[in-house]
Amino acid sequence: MYKGEDSQSGKSIYQSNYRKGTPKAVKHREILDLIQNVWSKKPLKLNITDSNGTVRQIEAKFDPAYDPDQNIRTDASKLMAGNRKGSASDRRVTLDLAGDWYKIAESSIYDYSKKETGKNSITHENVLKWHYFINDILFQEYGEAETAPYMITIDVKEKLDGNFVYSISAEKRKSDTPRTLLAEVNRTGKTNAANV
């Protein structure tokens, strides 16, 4: 849950939505419910800067498709497992922040885009491009005061049908994140003024 901003760094502080020891099955059920009944129905407005410098606003949402038999690995399945990115601890933090995914994604800044590389899986099917957004936050375990820096990455796939679908993952990072006076510097060294 959102706890406010750190007085020294200005980063948003998010506390785990779950006590330590909460079974994964509980998290999985709650995440699937949020994806299917809330976020897939509430598009997220984000700004993308195209290669020519043009800023365009898009509306992205979570894909609610889910196969309970797990014969088909959907985006929802990946998210329910912590997005399978980073270490086991990173995946747990991704799950622990589930209740705040929308807020975290909404306040993210554009990082970069790339064309689909042609991976052979259902989550890459009919994808034209990928757009990446980031949010540098501080994470707290449930009931704890200590925080740890995490980079949240929002992966937005632009599909051939014109839809934008996003997923989210957390990765623990060093505390020396490069910043300008107003915004975090992205991987290309540019700031995303459109999202500041």
Image (tube, rainbow, N blue to C red):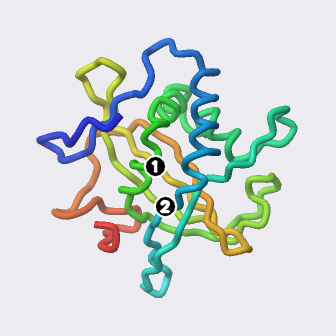
Residue kind at label 2, given as amino acid type: Leu
Residue 145 located left or right of residue 148: left
Q: Residues within 10 Å of mark 1 (few under 14, many from 20)?
A: many
Are the residues flagged by discs 1 and 2 in contact, CB closer than 8 Å? yes
Residue kind at label 1, given as amino acid type: Tyr
Residue 136: where, in percent of width, then height?
A: 34, 48
Image vertical order of residue 104 relative to residue 58, above or below: above
Residue 13: where, in percent of width, then height?
A: 28, 38
Q: Residue drawn 52% across and 27% down?
A: 92
Q: Quadrant of residue 3?
A: top left
Residue at image mark 2? 44
In this rendered view, identify the residue nearer to me: 181 or 99: 99
Residue at image mark 1? 102
Residue 34 located left or right of residue 177: right
In this rendered view, identify the residue nearer to me: 99 or 172: 99
Q: Residue drawn 58% across and 31% down?
A: 30
Residue 145: where, in percent of width, then height?
A: 23, 22
Indicate which disc, 1 or 2, sits on the residue closer to the N terminus: 2
Q: Quadrant of the N terminus?
A: top left
Residue 45 located left or right of residue 139: right
Label 1 vs label 2: CA separation? 8 Å
In this rendered view, identify the residue nearer to me: 136 or 164: 164
Q: Residues within 10 Å of mark 2 (few under 14, many from 20)?
A: some
